[in-house]
Image: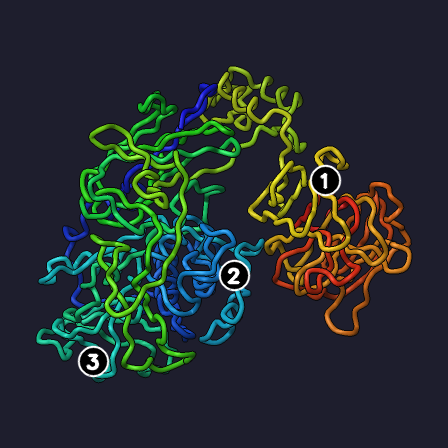
């Protein structure tokens, strides 16, 4: 892709290859060279292990992942730095539902889902890494948890993908280790436990391998891994069924009464634990509240294959707004990799041009890593940027349509049980990193997980120059990401970038940090000077509306063609159904949608649940008839509608059960004129508005809710009861997660 007419301030993001050393002192060198470790160690004694859970169905891989991340939050001090005194309790079933590899959801497919893994029936640590790396989780939310060992609220039905009360965590580094054929690298895993907390691992559980709470599978046994657990300590003198002493202390997810405490031991010499190259030891490091507003990526499914004949690659990204890229992330496919990474401003005539910055370093261990940029770079709307990385060994990881073979607790693994081991005859499939995603099935087909790509997104260097990866595989993208925070030129915070903001910037013109008139808010590119580059950034946002953070969905409905009603603030794009028509010039604010009153409506993803707290919904409407709905929620009620008698504005949102009552007004809204209708809920009061005027108010102790999407232009029952479809125009629909005054 070639970019033209760029501003000089425009910058390219750099995917720096996995430099582990930034921010974590122990990661600048191989941990096998660390100081001697004690002969026995137990994270529980230090308070760095969360309570044992009791998994349901084949979700051990979710529990193993979250147990390791929770331990990292404790040992790093990040959890206590947030002022938390309770145990971290992350949402295993959010990962289970929203990992993107299953039949419920795959954002690389339209419609999402339909093929792939079966929810509750397995996954692996690469699946978890893809989910974490693109910023979908891990999720901390009290609503995900129950008081007991089984966190069941989000198991039976899918939670929302995003909610206002979610705390989304980002894990900076995910590393893969093995102990080595002769345990020569065992100290790497031990050091990871000491420094970063519990390490996720795998095993082939069988009752025949477990004796007196000690598990050992001979290397000559053919059983494949079927269970995910976490290493929380070790004892070099622990005697097991293995020929030599030494064992890992293991946290299980089969309840606190299993084996007496929920813990057991696995021999150092077990076939898979610590030895399996894909699942034997995985360390989740640097867990923190996600500090990024946007993660640029094309590899939705993360590392699915490795292009081993490629050591130079770059990704192209196009910003939708001005942002500051502060970090980059990607995978290395082997240990001890040297990288060179460069940010370029242009790619023209087959050449990367206008180098903006460069970095180099060495990565000790394979895995996914995040690197802070020494000098963050500014990218601007619609000005593409190029992230180049050269790796010394292992090749480049990439995403592609693949079959997922590793199904920890996969199909037919332990039915719904709360305690005790699964049946002894569980089997799963396996692969290795060298042939990742290839046909490695032992006895059955794997789960096909489609990925998508487009031309001009990922490139690699060949003997003939730069080649588009799309030509090699039209489902493939390199695993190169850029992590950014938002910057805005609305300096006076009046929701629009205009001459008033120019005046604020002008008052600090040509000042530098430390000057008397210095105003850091005017230093838009954060280079400690207010100059032409800051003017350039302001120009890219000129007269653009700045959306408040509590606006959680906004459908302008100004499209000209197509079946998608785009959400301007997040990812809640709606889909047109029936024969709904775009009317580009007929709206109250530019365009609108014309509904025929028969079967037209717009369906959206989940936005919010009224039961969860305050919110507001606003829309412009024209036309309509008695009993017709403006906005409703699937599985819920009509949020805004015209009353059945005279078409007066009303809402059916009320307390659940027979004690609540709908709220109706005396304001007729079907008179053929444009009206701005609205509903606000502050946790106690429902207020209806028409054209900015309060027209009805009612008190309720709570509201009934639904965790489903919305219908615009149709009633809530069955995509609209007969007579509930809107016959007229709807424009500019907004939803806030607080009560506002229109």
Q: Nearer the viewer, mark 2 or mark 3?
A: 3
**Inter-mark Cα distance, 2 to 1:** 37 Å
Circle 1: is it few (<14), some (14-19), or many (20+) Cα within 10 Å? many
User: How far across and down, in percent of the image, does residue 268 sit?
Assistant: 16, 69
User: How far across and down, in percent of the image, does residue 321 sit?
Assistant: 53, 33
Q: Nearer the viewer, mark 3 or mark 1?
A: 1
Residue 180: quadrant of the picture: bottom left
Q: Give the mark nearest the N terminus, 3 or 1.
A: 3
Per the rendering, the mark at residue 141 is 2
- Marks 2 & 3, CB-CB < 8 Å contact: no
Residue 87: tell me if it is visible: no
The quadrant in which the N terminus is found is top left
Instruction: Identify the residue at image location x=71%, y=57%.
Output: 632
User: How far across and down, in percent of the image, does residue 310 sit?
Assistant: 22, 38
User: How far across and down, in percent of the image, does residue 312 sit?
Assistant: 25, 34
Per the rendering, the mark at residue 592 is 1
**Inter-mark Cα distance, 2 to 3:** 37 Å
Instruction: Identify the residue at image location x=25%, y=64%.
Output: 441
**Secondary element type, mark 3:** helix
Instruction: Identify the residue at image location x=34%, y=49%.
Output: 400
- How many numbered tags mark residues here? 3
Per the rendering, the mark at residue 70 is none
Q: Is residue 563 above or below residue 139?
A: above
**Secondary element type, mark 1:** strand
Closer to us: 524 or 679: 679
**Secondary element type, mark 2:** loop
Closer to us: 24 or 334: 334
Q: Which residue is mark 3?
A: 209
Q: Give the mark nearest the N terminus, 2 or 1.
A: 2
């Amino acid at each position: 892709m070639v970019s033209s007419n760029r501003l000089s301030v425009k910058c390219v993001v750099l995917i720096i290859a996995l430099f582990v050393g930034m921010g974590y002192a122990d990661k600048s060198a191989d941990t096998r060279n660390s100081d001697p470790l004690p002969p026995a160690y137990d994270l529980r004694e230090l308070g760095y292990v969360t309570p044992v859970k009791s998994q349901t169905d084949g979700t051990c891989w979710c529990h193993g992942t979250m147990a390791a991340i929770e331990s990292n939050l404790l040992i790093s001090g990040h959890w206590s730095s947030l002022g938390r005194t309770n145990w971290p309790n992350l949402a295993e079933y959010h990962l289970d539902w929203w990992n993107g590899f299953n039949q419920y959801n795959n954002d690389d497919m339209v419609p999402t889902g339909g093929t792939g893994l079966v929810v509750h029936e397995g996954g692996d640590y690469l699946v978890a890494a893809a989910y974490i790396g693109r910023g979908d989780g891990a999720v901390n939310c009290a609503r995900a948890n129950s008081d007991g060992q089984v966190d069941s609220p989000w198991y039976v039905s899918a939670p929302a993908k995003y909610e206002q009360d979610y705390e989304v965590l980002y894990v900076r580094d995910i590393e893969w280790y093995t102990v080595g054929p002769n345990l020569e690298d065992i100290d790497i895993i031990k050091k990871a436990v000491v420094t970063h907390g519990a390490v996720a691992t795998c095993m082939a559980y069988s009752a025949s391998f477990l004796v007196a709470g000690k598990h050992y599978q001979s290397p000559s046994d053919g059983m494949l891994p079927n269970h995910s657990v976490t290493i929380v300590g070790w004892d070099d003198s622990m005697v097991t069924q293995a020929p030599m002493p030494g064992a890992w202390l293991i946290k299980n997810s089969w309840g606190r009464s299993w084996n007496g405490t929920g813990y057991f031991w696995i021999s150092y010499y077990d076939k898979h634990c610590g030895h399996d190259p894909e699942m034997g030891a995985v360390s989740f490091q640097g867990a923190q509240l996600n500090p990024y507003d946007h993660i640029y990526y094309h590899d939705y499914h993360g590392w699915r294959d490795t292009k081993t004949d490629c050591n130079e690659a770059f990704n192209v990204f196009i910003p939708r707004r001005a942002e500051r890229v502060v970090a980059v992330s990607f995978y290395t496919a082997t240990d001890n990799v040297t990288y060179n990474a460069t940010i370029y401003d242009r790619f023209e005539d087959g050449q990367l041009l206008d180098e903006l910055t460069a970095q180099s370093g060495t990565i000790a261990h394979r895995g996914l890593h995040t690197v802070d940029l020494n000098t963050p770079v500014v990218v601007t709307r619609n000005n593409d940027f190029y992230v180049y990385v050269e790796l010394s060994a292992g090749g480049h990881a990439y995403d592609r349509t693949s079959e997922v073979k590793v199904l920890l607790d996969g199909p037919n693994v332990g039915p719904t049980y709360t305690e005790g081991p699964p049946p002894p005859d569980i089997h799963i499939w396996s692969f290795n990193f060298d042939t990742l995603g290839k046909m490695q099935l032992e006895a059955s087909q794997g789960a096909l997980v489609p990925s998508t790509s487009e031309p001009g997104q990922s490139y690699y260097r060949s003997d003939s120059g730069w080649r588009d990866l799309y030509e090699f595989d039209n489902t493939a993208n390199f695993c190169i990401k850029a992590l950014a925070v938002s910057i805005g030129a609305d300096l006076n915070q009046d929701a629009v970038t205009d001459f008033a903001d120019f005046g604020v910037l002008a008052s600090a013109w040509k000042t530098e940090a430390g000057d008397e008139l210095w105003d850091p808010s005017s230093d838009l590119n954060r280079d400690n000077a207010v100059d032409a580059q800051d003017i350039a950034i302001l120009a890219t946002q000129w007269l653009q509306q700045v959306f408040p953070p509590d606006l959680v969905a906004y459908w302008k409905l100004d499209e000209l063609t197509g079946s998608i009603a785009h959400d301007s603030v997040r990812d809640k794009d709606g889909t047109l159904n029936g024969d709904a028509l775009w009317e580009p010039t007929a709206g109250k604010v530019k365009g609108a949608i014309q509904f025929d009153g028969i079967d037209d409506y717009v369906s959206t993803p989940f936005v919010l649940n009224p039961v969860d707290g305050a919110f507001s919904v606003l829309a412009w409407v024209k036309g309509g008839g008695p009993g017709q709905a403006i906005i409703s929620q699937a599985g819920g009620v009509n949020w805004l509608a015209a009353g059945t008698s005279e078409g007066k504005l009303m809402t059916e949102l009320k307390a659940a059960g027979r004690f609540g009552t709908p709220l109706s007004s005396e304001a007729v809204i079907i008179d053929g004129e444009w009206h701005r209708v609205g509903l606000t809920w502050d946790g106690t009061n429902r207020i209806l508005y028409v054209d900015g005027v309060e027209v009805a108010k009612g008190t309720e102790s709570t509201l009934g809710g639904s965790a489903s999407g919305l219908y615009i232009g149709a009633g809530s029952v069955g995509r609209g009861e007969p007579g509930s479809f809107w016959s007229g125009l709807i424009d500019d629909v907004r939803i806030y997660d607080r009560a506002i005054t229109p």
